[in-house]
Image (spheres, grey):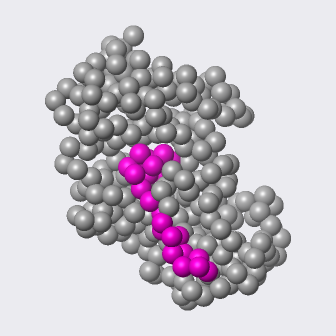
Amino acid sequence: MLPFEFLEPQTLADAIAMLGDHDDDACVFGGGTALLLAMRQRMIAANVVVSLGALDQLRGVTFSPGQGLRIGAMTCHAEIARAEPVHAHYPVLAQLFSGLANPQVRNQGTVGGNVCYADPATDPQSCLIALGANVIIAGPDGERRLPMREFVVDFFTTALEPGEILTQIIVPPPSPQTVGHYRRLLRTPAEHRPVANVSLVVTERSNAWDAVSLVIGAAVPVAQTMYRAEAFLCGRPLSLDLAEEAAQIVAEDLNPVSDGRGDAAFRTQIVRAATRRIIAEAAGLDWSKAS
């Protein structure tokens, strides 16, 4: 690892100023689980590392019926998984964060660091998009709000401008009829990084869905919203045939990546199977009987 200067600002304003002072020579340190590995492998070479560890205002999980869920960017994954408001109002997030990576990462890594690192093979991005989450960003010109679906723009690339810091994630309040579902798929049981994941959020009514949000992650460069499949699923009677047809639409529209952990054809097939299964399960159907 190359030598670097480690700065510990005591306020958010100081952190933004330090990033501005050092421009491209600086990077932000959250939990450090991914950043330190990247620096050790010299994928990232920063002369200055600005730690957000002292900024308690960036931690914690709160909920209000009007505003929804607020997750501070410096909140670790395990804390989100344990938080009472998450279990009460967003059980799909409790499921996601309790199974993310491994215990070491869950207890040290932060949700803000995960999202800002923008590794395609990760879990939170697709589920947060499916839930309609927004990010709050602070920078030299003040604060701005951005939909989560617009935050990650490419491999390891986000919409953050120079000197900006992600401060919190806001998930809108769910309706009583809204239910979320999440599945992650691993290449082998020993791995912690998914080769694909599927997030499905539906607003239920008798034997049909009024609203559907379906997002695929990990198998694609950036979490991909399956707009055509969403429209297809809305308002139709729920059945195994419907799940099969929607899964085929997802397979046709998917923009998969190919790498050493799986080529595009492999990822397309597992996403198709996982999509069929998650739709059937969300509809209360026996997915094993699907053709």
Work out whether residue 146 can be spotted: yes
Depth check, front residue: 232 or 204:
232
Q: Where is residue 262 drawn, in percent x and y?
A: 66, 30
Residue positioned 69% across, 65% down in the render: 36
State left or right for residue 190 relative to residue 204.
right
Residue 41 location (% of width, % of height) = 78, 58
| Residue under the image location 75 percent in, 76 percent down | 23
| Point 44% across, 74% down: residue | 59
Residue 39 picture quarter: bottom right
Which region is colored magenta?
123-145
In the rendered image, residue 233, in percent from the top left (x then y), is placed at 35, 27
- For the question of whether residue 108 can be seen, the reply is no
Return the residue nearer the eye: 124 or 203.
203
Residue 183, quarter of picture? top left
The N terminus lies in quadrant? bottom right
| Observer-nearest of 125 and 209 | 209
Residue at the far right in the pictured view: 2
Percent position of residue 64, x then y: 25, 67
Task: Say whether residue 97 is left or right of residue 163.
Answer: left
**Is residue 5 one of those drawn in magenta?**
no
Q: Residue at x 47, y 76 (%)?
A: 58
